[in-house]
């Protein structure tokens, strides 16, 4: 099924919860409201014609100028062999998105990583701890306004350039 | 306490009459079987694991953050470090995602060069994987045999691009250099020598009773579970799912090449056990040899790289591509804002998913099986942490 047909089905089922679909993009994507993401995911996963049984990739992008952090879901269906991309915009100063861990187990670690690096809080997540950075790290490094601390536990993060 | 009282106390502790206590053990970050730096916190009841929680991040080198600072061309050498055991695929992934963003087409010969380099890299990565797997389990000899051949592939790749591990061979739009003179003959000679050696590995270890005892029926993963956790590549195929990006969503020139996709059948136990994951890799090496032979036969002439501007500025937008790496479907997501620097780059790797399933599959296994599980899932720690 192509992106336009999938969007049509979602629009009929969820109305306001599902936003526009960009068919001109390299990978067509559908905008979804944060509040609706779990239901939309569940529907995409369970519907026999859609059967998106695999969350290929989940990532976050900080759009500082727009004031949002976008969570991007790349879905794939092994039985139907089709793709779709979902995007959820969360406000940058208070990013909260419900977890889809209950639909795809793979989301557990992806969401921990996005929380770690971009500071998106996935509500309802079973184990929302930092994944890559140390537990006591301050800040979220992939945010565009992140400033590296000058030291971490007395270890300097500054180094003279060897090229100078 | 009287002797009589003591006897009563022992009887109260359980049907076996022995007092047991749950232990928390630390495995890693430096442990020979972790192939890199990673750590498990294992809760064990005697020899039986109750849970094994992975603690990752020891090899986090902020590669995704670096991409935002170094520009599109400049990021290519960094991609080698995402998975330094199979760096060609990372090169190819980054190249492909940039080409998709900018709408560049790679010349035919360039694509063949990529496939040749990538398939050699797949064999060397699988050799490392199966070699260290049997070593971790306790068989020393096959490891040396596997590494003997891996060295020869390293020599071939060194001749191709000057490096033995972090190749930096591919560029956006193609590859850096054409094959050196006489390269095809050398490669074919290697393949002639190598293919019979796969049978030798089978004789040495594959159907060895002690080895089978350690891997058959251990940590079986069902196809449904594998998909839900997004296992990819050999780990997915071992669970019986016949899916290979090269065959099912052909990129590069894979649609012109013939090869089979081996899947796990549970021939020594359950479908998706450690043995299936091992044997799928052994069989994939043969398929890679087949692909390589076809490549040398049908490779066209012409340029190996498209014209790509030095100041590479793809139009604003995002793109996602999938490459069948040695560790399976590797996803590259890149966002461009129209400037010289990528706005965001995310790599979704096979080991990342494989690592997250360990906690689930290791429950109830013996402590020594954890080593077999890590090795059979072919986890390379830098790929998890990036």
Image (cartoon, coloured by chain):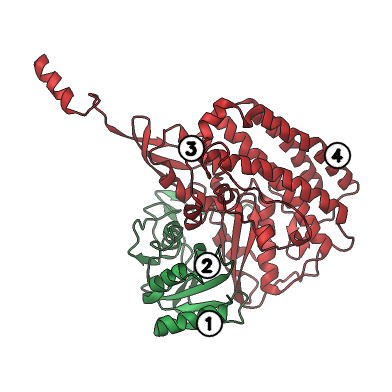
Chain colours: A green, B red
Q: Which residue is mark 2?
A: A75
Chain ID, mark 2: A
Which label belongs to residue B189? 4
Disc 3/disc 2 C-alpha distance (Å): 30 Å
**Percent from the top left, x then y, of residue B382?**
56, 48
The reply to whether the C-beta atoms of the residues labelled 3 and 1 are less than 8 Å apart is no
A144 up-or-down from A150: above or below: below
Q: Separation of disc 2 and disc 1 at Cα?
A: 15 Å
Circle 4/circle 2 CB separation < 8 Å: no
**Image check: B23 left or right of A73?**
left
Which residue was labeled with disc 1?
A21
Subunit of label 4: B
Q: In this view of the protein, which residue sits in the foreground, A112 or B312?
A: A112
Residue B1 image point, x, y percent: 9, 18
How many residues crowd mark 4 within 10 Å: few (<14), some (14–19), many (20+)? few
Callout in the foreground (4, 3) = 3
**Foreground: B79 or B52?**
B52
Circle 1 Cα neighbour tier, 10 Å, few/some/many (<14 / 14–19 / ≥20): many
The CA distance from mark 4 to mark 3 is 38 Å
In the rendered view, would you say A53 is above or below B338? Answer: above
Give the Cα separation between the discs numbered 3 and 1. Answer: 45 Å
Instruction: Using the image, determine if residue B273 lies above or below residue B344.
Output: above
Between the residue at mark 4 and the residue at mark 1, the CA separation in whole angstroms equals 53 Å
Query: Which SS class for mark 1?
Result: strand
User: Where's residue B298, x and y in %?
Assistant: 86, 56
């Amino acid at each position: 099924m192509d992106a336009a047909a999938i969007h049509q089905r979602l629009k009929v089922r969820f109305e306001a919860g599902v936003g526009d679909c960009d068919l001109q993009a390299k990978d067509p994507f559908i905008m979804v409201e944060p509040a609706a993401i779990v239901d939309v995911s569940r529907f995409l996963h369970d519907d026999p014609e859609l059967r998106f049984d695999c969350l290929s990739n989940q990532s976050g992008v900080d759009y500082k100028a727009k004031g949002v952090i976008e969570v991007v879901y790349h879905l794939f269906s092994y039985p139907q062999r089709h793709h779709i991309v979902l995007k959820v915009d969360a406000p940058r100063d208070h990013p909260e998105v419900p977890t889809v861990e209950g639909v795809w187990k793979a989301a557990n670690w992806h969401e921990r990583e996005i929380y770690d690096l971009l500071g998106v809080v996935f509500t309802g997540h079973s184990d929302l701890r930092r994944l890559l950075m140390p537990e006591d790290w301050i800040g979220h490094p992939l945010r565009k306004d992140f400033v590296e601390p000058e030291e971490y536990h007395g270890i300097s993060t500054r180094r003279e350039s060897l090229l100078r | 306490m009287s002797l009589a009282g003591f006897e009563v106390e022992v009887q109260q502790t359980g049907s076996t009459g022995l007092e047991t206590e749950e232990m928390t053990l630390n495995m890693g970050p430096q442990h020979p079987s972790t192939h890199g730096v990673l750590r498990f916190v294992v809760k064990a009841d005697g020899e039986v694991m109750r849970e094994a929680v992975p603690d990752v991040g020891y090899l986090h080198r902020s590669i995704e953050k670096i991409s935002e600072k170094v520009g599109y061309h400049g990021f290519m050498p960094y991609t080698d470090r995402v998975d330094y055991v199979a760096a060609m695929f990372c090169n190819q992934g980054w190249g492909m995602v940039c080409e998709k963003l900018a709408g560049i087409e790679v010349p035919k010969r360039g694509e063949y060069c990529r496939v040749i380099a990538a398939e050699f890299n797949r064999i060397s990565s699988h050799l490392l994987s199966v070699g260290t797997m049997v070593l971790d389990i306790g068989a020393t000899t096959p490891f040396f045999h596997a590494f003997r051949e891996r060295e020869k592939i390293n020599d071939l790749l060194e001749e191709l691009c000057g490096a033995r591990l972090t190749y930096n061979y591919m560029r956006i739009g193609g590859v850096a250099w054409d094959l050196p003179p006489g390269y095809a003959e050398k490669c074919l000679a290697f393949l002639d020598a190598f293919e019979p050696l796969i049978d030798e590995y089978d004789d040495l270890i594959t159907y060895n009773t002690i080895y089978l005892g350690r891997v058959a029926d251990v940590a079986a993963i069902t196809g449904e579970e594998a998909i839900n956790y997004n296992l990819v590549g050999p780990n997915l195929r071992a669970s019986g799912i016949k899916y290979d990006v090269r065959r099912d969503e052909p990129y590069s020139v894979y649609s012109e090449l013939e090869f089979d996709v081996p899947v796990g059948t549970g021939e020594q136990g359950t479908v998706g056990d450690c043995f299936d994951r091992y044997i799928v890799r052994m069989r994939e090496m043969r398929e890679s040899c087949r692909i390589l032979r076809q490549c040398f036969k049908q490779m066209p002439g012409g340029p190996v790289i498209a014209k790509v501007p030095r100041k590479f500025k793809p139009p604003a937008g995002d793109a996602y591509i999938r490459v069948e790496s040695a560790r399976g479907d590797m996803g590259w997501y890149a966002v461009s804002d129209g400037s010289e620097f990528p706005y965001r780059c995310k790599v979704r790797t096979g080991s990342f998913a494989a690592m997250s399933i360990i906690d689930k599959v290791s429950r109830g296994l013996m402590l020594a099986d954890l080593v077999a599980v890590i090795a059979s899932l072919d986890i390379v720690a830098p790929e998890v942490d990036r």
